[in-house]
Amino acid sequence: MRNLKCTVSYDGSNYHGFQRQANALAVQEVIERAIESLVKKEIKIIGASRTDSGVHAKGQVFNFKVESSIPTVKFPIALNTRLPDDVVILDACEVADDFHARYHTSDKIYEYQIYNAEFPSPFYRNYAYHIYNQLDLDLMKEGAEYLVGEHDFSSFRSSGCNAKNPIRRIFNIDIDREDNLIKLSIHGNGFLYNMVRIIVGTLVKVALGRIKPEAVQEILLAKDRSKAGPTAPAQGLILKKINY
Amino acid sequence: MRNLKCTVSYDGSNYHGFQRQANALAVQEVIERAIESLVKKEIKIIGASRTDSGVHAKGQVFNFKVESSIPTVKFPIALNTRLPDDVVILDACEVADDFHARYHTSDKIYEYQIYNAEFPSPFYRNYAYHIYNQLDLDLMKEGAEYLVGEHDFSSFRSSGCNAKNPIRRIFNIDIDREDNLIKLSIHGNGFLYNMVRIIVGTLVKVALGRIKPEAVQEILLAKDRSKAGPTAPAQGLILKKINY
């Protein structure tokens, strides 16, 4: 029995998130079906992160235990031929028997894309948050600095969050613009439910001049979700990388 | 009666090209429907370029004559609310009565995207040509140089091409890689049918080492479609800009 760790990239537009559900198609289900069709056994995979409906991944990780004569290195290509073209396995490797994709993460990088232009782009309609008004990235960067470090992120989690400990560490937030596309890259040791999207929704208010950059610190200290900005839309979010 | 010139961006994935057809949905039809719903008159637009099925545009141009009390500057937003989100009007301006979007072009820029990696990307499945083998961009650039200038491009047009004169001038071909994405940008005074896609198909053969860069000149001089490489797939092609 091998324990296999896989990296998967997916366009989340057509899925109800990663985690398998009874009444809607999730990425987990299409992956499990592909593995089952390959190894002819029922398989349950453990995903590192439960991405929401419409959220994308370039580096989601999952593991599963399998008895099979297929060499580990052959799994990606064998699975990709059985997967729809919006889900692509990038890598497979054998890991220790006790490796757990969700419990053993050390840190993660999320990316969030904003398309900042007068009119939306047909090419980013499923991959970015369109904002009409000009965003001031200097203000946005100044606001973001208050979030770096170890903090209680209670103001930046949705009510559905069931994490017991709201303390997380953000290592850095990079913000760059190339033409009309703004990319925020957020690297942290872990994230509460909707934390990245609420951070983005709050930093957008800063970049629009509606709140001052210093307000981000006050929002943090308030430990109150109602003080932060709105949850930015799902389609701009990409799970970029998970480290172990 | 005003003559309006519009710039439109579209994701061609769900359309059978730009030009209106009897039995399949084309971009022209959805634009004409949107204009008709706005001005309550039957309208026929003249597109600058007949992009093929699956080909995209960031700067397609069309013009149409209209009698309407709606100010020109209001047309983009009024049309965008009537268009699906994969077709976006970027600009409208009034032009001289004799302006013709197809006949009066001076030069065009096309972009072609290649995704060069072991596995395809779910995000580029509709926007790039996936090539598994490593491409040598130095060879590709060397081959491309033979195409710059004024030439008879008979070897680089599909049999369906009904242009009388096969002479075209290419001003330059830029080739860049960023991570796994290779972008070719081709600027010319005009293009024969499938010319960009056959150029890309030929330069890919050069970049794979299957033919020498110098062979591109021999292919040009042969004036024979069968000597060039295959027509690269439609989904990698983007009509970037049209100048007048």
Image (cartoon, coloured by chain):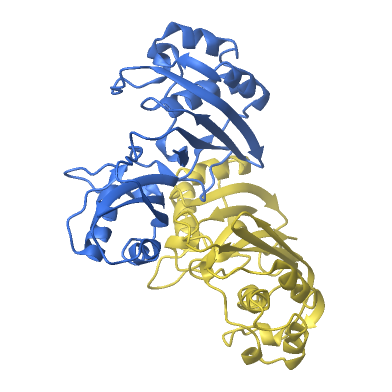
Chain colours: A yellow, B blue
> In the figure, B201 relative to A234: above or below?
above
> Residue at (55%, 26%) from the top-left corner?
B171
Left or right: where does residue A76 sit relative to residue A168?
left
Picture quarter containing residue B57?
A: top left
Q: How many marks?
A: 0
Picture quarter containing residue A139?
A: bottom right
> Residue at (22%, 60%) from the top-left corner?
B36
Residue A46 visible, this orientation: yes
> Residue at (37%, 42%) from the top-left corner?
B54
Which residue is nearer to you in this view: A129 or B185?
B185
How far across and how far down the image is residue B152, in percent?
Answer: 43, 13
> In the figure, B59 relative to A65: above or below?
above
Left or right: where does residue B78 sit relative to residue A93?
left
Quadrant where the image shows the C terminus of chain B? top left
Which residue is nearer to you in this view: A160 or B235?
B235
Which residue is nearer to you in this view: B67 or A84?
B67
Quadrant where the image shows the N terminus of chain B? bottom left
> In the figure, A37 relative to B231: above or below?
below
How far across and how far down the image is residue B37, in percent?
Answer: 23, 64
How far across and how far down the image is residue B130, in percent?
Answer: 51, 37
How far across and how far down the image is residue B82, in percent?
Answer: 31, 65
> In the figure, A107 relative to B210: above or below?
below
Q: Residue furthest right?
A: A149
Residue B208 visible, this orientation: no
